[in-house]
Image: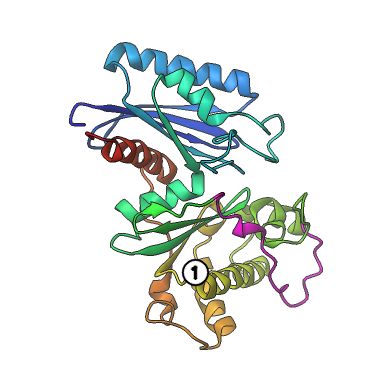
Amino acid sequence: MPNDVFAAIEAGGTKFLCAVASADGHVLAQQRIATVAPDETFAAVASFYDRQREILGPVAAAGVASFGPLDLDHASSSLGRLTTTPKPGWSGVDMRGRVAAIVRAPVVIDTDVNCAGLAEARYGAGQGLDRLCYVTVGTGIGIGVIEHGRPMGGVGHSEAGHMRVAPAAGDDFAGTCPFHGDCLEGLACGPAIAARWGKPAEELGEDHPAWVMQAHYLAALSVNLTYLLRPERIILGGGVMAHPALHDAVRARFAALAAGYALDRCSADPATFICPPAAQEPSAGLLGAIALARDFITDSPGG
């Protein structure tokens, strides 16, 4: 592993971040590629890695942090494919297979939010914790669960952003989720905020009533995650969480909704239990993708 070079991709709905990294995780080169139609996008990805192969030689493995939903069932013949993604033209795309053909190496794939959570566990606000939940609030709402330094496995990945929660007082908004309407994502993601208030989150004033409502929904999510999974920390990230007072508002609403019931040594103190991300450069998803590739080599026989 000392001389290995790794490929890493953070594949998002608006952009692909492509990188190659050294054995110690240092990024040697990277490029941002717009997410357009699959063939056009992967052609640009291939061009980047063809150039890097000429400079740095072959890669040992690749990690992919992808938007979803993804088939992550290792018993499935479609492992690594996108399923019913709302991204037009991308449902059914074999993300793992197409990247493997480009990098000519084994590919490990997981969700972008699981990879961001993995980066937080290794390098950020989740260091030293056995279990954490990473929440991203942006175009959608995604939740990653990291257990003992690895994404929680199983036949699929968490879709807790589509859970139902009690509506905020006075909220009669129908929601924007094309599948569930007023699920959590349909009520509190970035596009839902814009649809509800007529302007995007970044254009809303600090005292806008949107933030009280937003705090309610994210606190309700945090209470449900606490009682179901017992994480040691919940990390709230994503573009919507850039509002300066939102983390404190979520903490206050969390305390009110939990009402002191069955809290543990971690969740009893919202000030430390609910926090912003810390691993952000070059991006949490890309750092997690690099970690996936490095783990693959380390876990392999002779690694």
Q: Name the residue: 41% across, 75% down.
A: 271
Q: Position of residue 197 (x, y in %)?
A: 74, 59
* Residue kind at label 1, given as amino acid type: Leu
User: What residue span does the magenta drawing correspond to?
Assistant: 155-175
Q: Is residue 122 above or below residue 223?
A: above
Direction top: furthest residue: 54
Q: How many marks?
A: 1
Q: Quadrant of residue 51?
A: top left
Direction bottom: furthest residue: 260
Residue 256 in view here: yes
Left or right relative to 23: residue 84: right
Task: Give 262 or 281, whichever is nearer the viewer.
Answer: 262
Q: Is residue 248 above or below residue 163?
A: below
Left or right relative to 130: residue 111: right
Q: Main secondary structure of the magenta part?
A: loop
Q: Quadrant of the N terminus?
A: top left
Q: Is label 1 in a helix, a strand or a loop?
A: helix
Q: Quadrant of residue 9?
A: top left
Q: Position of residue 117 (x, y in %)?
A: 43, 53
Disc 1: which residue: 229
Q: Name the residue: 24% across, 27% down.
A: 4
